[in-house]
Amino acid sequence: MAAYITPSLRSALERLKHAGSVNGLLLCWRRQILINLLPYEEFRAERLLQALHDARAHFGSGGDRDVNTFWFGYEGVFVLAMFQGECLLITLHTHASEVDFLRRAGLTFLDDTQLLVQALLQPSPDDEISRGDTQPLGNLDMSGLPPQSSGPTKIIPRQGRAEIGSIH
Amino acid sequence: MSAFEVIPLPLQLFTLKDGVVASDSGQEAVNNYAADFQGLRHFGLKVGECLDLGAPWMGTLQEEDFTLNFAYFDAGTDAKDPGAGALIGERSPMFELLTRASSLEA
């Protein structure tokens, strides 16, 4: 899942990584990882994702609560988790005082990238067809002529051009 | 104010000592806070376990109209370490609420 990522979603997340004292980000959809920019192995990121979903389910089990943010502090690092819609964004940061700024930045990121996430989850069928029909340039036998895409290209022979030139 | 309008919970402060939660806000408030605190600390431990970070010294949860936290004093992380907590019936800035709970140490 994490291998096929649209560059713009990843670059948007990379930009967020440069906000404040952020040293890791994890973007998830439901219980799947979309992009892992944490300084941890994939299996640890998977466990983290499951633990946070379990935490949310625990507090929401009564039916009347919807916890959308968790923030935990450890020796030298903080973990901020924001749920929005079906997405979860986890941020690792080092300065406690930046948490409210990072929460707003994270929610803005989730708002602004809804279409990109949607495109990642449901690639357009048109894109797949056009990708399959595209012929690599290296396979074309052009015989010294430019490629004819939709119709014949009108080429003025050298001789003709020479004759036109001789009118003057 | 309409009859159905819910008055948001005011700021309530709690102390943690030897694994016991105490507050001036009444027994019901203490019971409710203790349940949330235990759940939050439990999942803080789980998250710390996932990333090999150890036990949390603080934790916060936030809903649309509710914020609750806990923080141990002096870098403590054990369940019996002294600490404090706070809750409020609004989406409060998390750092501000952490500062408020931590100020109970003084």
Image (cartoon, coloured by chain):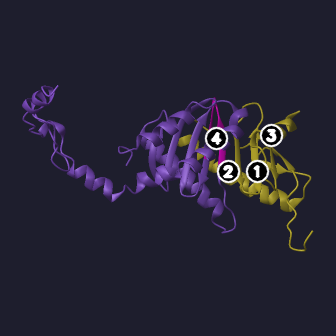
Chain colours: A purple, B yellow
Marks 2 and 1, the one that precedes in the sequence: 2
User: Residue at image x 41%, y 51%?
Assistant: A120
Q: CA distance from mark 2 to mark 1?
A: 9 Å
Q: Which mark is residue B1?
A: none
Q: CA distance from mark 4 to mark 2?
A: 24 Å
Q: Chain ID for label 2?
A: B
From this viewpoint, is residue B51 visible?
no
Name the residue type under label 4: Ala
Camera-side residue: B60 or A150? A150
Name the residue type under label 2: Leu
Q: Which mark is residue B40?
A: 2
Query: Residue B33: image x %, image y %?
Result: 78, 55
Q: Is residue A28 left or right of residue A105?
A: left
A144 in the magenta segment: no
Q: Which mark is residue B96?
A: 3
The residue where tag 1 is placed is B68
Name the residue type under label 1: Leu
**Secondary structure under the numbered disc 4 in the rendered image:** helix
- Mark 2 or mark 1, which is nearer to you? 1
Whether the residues at callouts 2 and 1 have beta carbons within 8 Å, the answer is yes
Marks 3 and 1, the one that precedes in the sequence: 1
**Secondary structure under the numbered disc 2 in the rendered image:** helix
Q: Is residue A8 left or right of residue B73?
A: left
Q: Label 2: how many residues lie within 10 Å, few (<14), some (14-19) or many (20+)?
A: many
The residue where tag 4 is placed is A105
Q: Chain ID for label 3?
A: B
Q: CA distance from mark 2 to mark 3?
A: 19 Å
- Mark 3 or mark 1, which is nearer to you? 3
Camera-side residue: B6 or A45? B6
**Secondary structure under the numbered disc 3 in the rendered image:** helix
Q: Residue furthest bottom?
A: B3
Task: Examine the rendered structure and indicate whether residue B28 appears above or below residue B59.
Answer: below
